[in-house]
Amino acid sequence: LEADPGHGVRCHLYDPAVARPPGAAPPPLPERGGVARWGGAGGGRAEPLLRVRGLRVHFPIHKGILRRVAGRVRAVDGVDLDLEAGRTLALVGESGCGKTTAGKALLHLVRPTAGSVRYRGRELTSLPRRAWRPLRRELQIVFQDPFASLNPRMTVGEIVEEGLVAQRLEPDPARRRERVAALLERVGLPAEAAARYPHEFSGGQRQRICIARALAVGPRLIVCDEPTSALDVSVQAQILNLLRELQEGEGEGQGLAYLLITHDMAVVEYLAHRVAVMYLGRIVEQGAVEAVLERPAHPYTQALLSAVPQPDPEGRREVIRLPGDLPSPVDSPAGCHFHPRCPRAMPRCREAYPGVTRLGADHEVACFLHGEAVRPEGA
């Protein structure tokens, strides 16, 4: 039912068929005082391309001859994300925080334990394996290591056209070769590269081949898992420029959405529109890149940004050194997972996990330092 223009509600109180005294109006809608989940700060936005709610990925630990479950690795422990078409969402955090596992779970390369993943309004977590085949066209991934993600026994042409063959998109071999040549030129490689093998290329060129392979089937969303971390700095800039050009330019790749998994805040600032900061399987802060990078609210985000080198001496932040290492996801700390390392931890941080607090139009944080929690732990 429509309570106001652009505002729907599922409630009999607003049903015109319900009898009311003559002239009586429906009861007023309550004011929205806070967000109950991540993503609430963008409440007026249309349905995103990808919507993730409560995503969990737990791996059982087996022991003994009978292989009994002795514990669980909570790699991803309740992640909420929104990604709009044609935009880039960066997922950042330390190594081991679960960001790569989360990215793979979205594509069902790792089976989620719980939660909801909706792509273009369609629930993905309950889909049978056969139903995933046509979806592979629209959801692709560029892996972190270009040296390990290309089959050394296949030529570049065979690698790039493999998706076209698997999806039965182009039955004519001559047209497939034309398509491969066009894709290679789109990512900055000569068409002659199709006849060569991966070992004949540099790291940056191999990553371009990986991007061409992902583009071959015409995806709407690409998960970029640390696409530049294995490359030299000069080559990193070339790959980032290519990703940006593909998204913003015309032709192949125009309007792509990226889920950018990285630990490099400079990459986030250059390529992303929104950023979500992850710590030990949970999101601690997210919002527009400008808001999060200029006004970091969570102590963990502040520590990450303080470690980014600044060429301008006047713009440098004081480096925040966190004690200890990332705790084990097998035995996560009670309450806020960050409290053992947090320089501003309070007693309540050890007792409960903070809910989501809205700080601005597109800026949210899960921290007791910023108002009352509106979502209790486990809600």
Image (cartoon, rainbow, N blue to C red):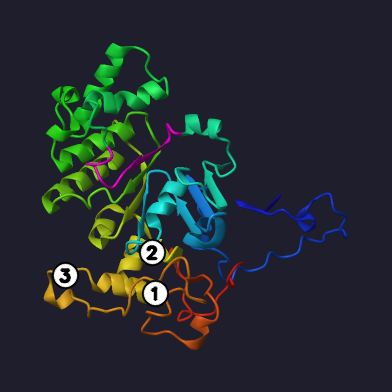
Question: Looking at the picture, how far across and down is residue 88, in whole percent?
Answer: 35, 50
Residue 145 sits inside the magenta stretch: yes
Taking the spot 38% from the left edge, 80% from the top edge, the residue there is 342
The residue stretch that appears in magenta: 136-149
Write down the residue under mark 3.
310
Q: Position of residue 338 (x, y in %)?
A: 42, 75
Residue positioned 49% across, 81% down in the render: 349
Which residue was labeled with disc 1? 298
Most frequent secondary structure within the magenta stretch: loop
Residue at the far front: name it. Answer: 65
Secondary structure at badge 1 equals loop
Determine whether the residue tagged by mark 3 lies in a helix, strand or loop: loop
Q: Inspect the image, locate mark 1, and give the three-letter code of the amino acid beneath it.
A: His
Query: Looking at the picture, which amino acid does disc 3 mark?
Result: Gln
Residue 215 vertical placement versus 164 (above, below): below
Nearer to me, 168 or 38:
168
On whether residue 25 falls in the magenta region, the answer is no
The image quadrant of residue 141 is top left
Answer whether labels 3 and 1 touch (C-beta < 8 Å).
Answer: no
x and y percentages locating residue 42 in the rendered image? 49, 59
Q: Residue at x 33, y 51 (%)?
A: 260
Q: Earlier in the sequence, mark 3 or mark 1?
A: 1
Q: Is residue 166 above or below residue 265?
A: above
Q: Give the distance between the C-alpha atoms of the residues marked 3 and 2, in whole angstroms.
A: 20 Å
Question: Residue 281: x percent and y percent?
Answer: 45, 63
The local secondary structure at tag 2 comes to strand
* Residue 296 visible in the snapshot: no
Q: Nearer the viewer, residue 231 or 39?
A: 231
